[in-house]
Image (cartoon, rainbow, N blue to C red):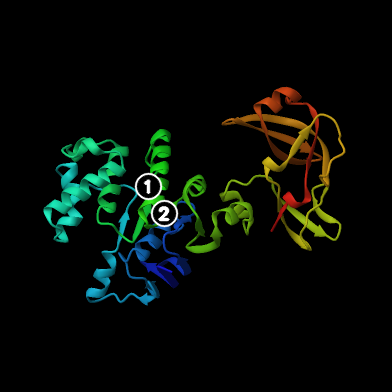
Amino acid sequence: MILELENICQTKNGQQILSNINLTVSENTFFVIMGPTGCGKTTLLRVAGLLDKPSSGRVMYSGEPILYRGKKRLQTRRKMVTVFQRPVLFRGSVFSNVEWGLRIRGIPRSEVDRRVSRVLEMVDLEGYVNRDSGTLSGGELQRVALARALVIEPEILILDEPTTSLDPALRLSLLRRLRDLHSGAGITFIIATHDFTDALSLGTTGAVMSNGRIEQIGTIDEIFYSPSTPSLASFVGMKNVFPAEFTENGAIAEELLVKHTSDKRGHGFLAIPPEAIVVSRETTVTSERNHFAGTIISVERTGSIFSISVDCRNLVIIASVTRSALSDLNLITGQDVYISFKASAVHVF
């Protein structure tokens, strides 16, 4: 383990920002901290990056506790770099900005030139050595800040909402670049984001925050496919989250009896992924244990996929279908249809 946070609490101006945070980040992983704006992500990154001392708890680096005095903290801080959401560059050229971390470390000029050239190539800015920092676009500024961080060859690179201020094309480009850099640089990445699609694009493991607390930790797949609470299910984009009463026969949601594979009893919630639902015009014999009749009340395009909202006895269930399926089945508002899904596809909270 390269970084461990134990029982971290942070209070500012009498307000508790972080509460009992426990995190372990393994070496060479791409760890994603997710959560809505204002949940404490940036504060957590500042503590993890040794920029702020926590009110209580401790940070461990490579198995040793960090002391917030003396040379040891400075030596450890130099092994990690934090790039904030809106990085600020110095006046001057791109080269002078990128070389700064090497210059203060006393790296020889020949080595500086080689390393700056290498990282500018890594972020696709080879011809920008003499460009004035004041003339850069938002995407170029982000890439220069990334190069400035990478050039010192840190053990941990911390990124705070790196895609927030970018337009869609630049955002996708930066996500691809970060993914490629992580696979080839041998650096542990920690990124904070409020957009779960960033986590799906980049992360291997992660944590979801809410109101200064950690709600769930695990692999990105675990968080996406098995969120632990209804609020997490909503955050990761999971639709069809319904309150239900769980009995030995199944879960009762409105007037539907939904079959599932959990042994849960009493009140709770269930979620049905839209992509797990099959829509048909006629009733069929299938292996799916859940089969309901309904009426389409809306058809909405979401990218290359269409979301079909089906009213099944007062429970509106959303299914995802492709353009070809929409056309082949002639799925339109007011059409009577059948939906089916497996019991194993139902998530239970």
Sooner in the amino-acid sequence: mark 2 or mark 1: 1
**Which quarter of the rendered picture does the N terminus lie within?**
bottom left
**Pointer 2 with pointer 1, Cβ within 8 A:** yes
Q: Where is residue 282 in the image (x, y as percent from the top left)?
A: 85, 30
Q: How many marks?
A: 2
* Residue at screen point 59% across, 46% down: 237
**Circle 2 residues within 10 Å: few <14, some 14–19, many ≥20:** many
Q: Is residue 242 left or right of residue 257?
A: left
Residue type, mark 2 in image: Ile
Residue type, mark 1 in image: Pro
Q: In this view, does 193 lie to the left or right of 227?
A: left
Q: Is residue 44 above or below residue 6?
A: above
- Report which residue position mark 2 lands on: 191
- Report which residue position mark 1 lands on: 162
Q: In this view, does 333 lie above or below 80?
A: above
Towards the viewer: 111 or 194: 111
**Which quarter of the rendered picture does the C terminus lie within?**
bottom right
* Residue at screen point 75% across, 31% down: 296
- The answer to which image quadrant residue 153 occupies is bottom left
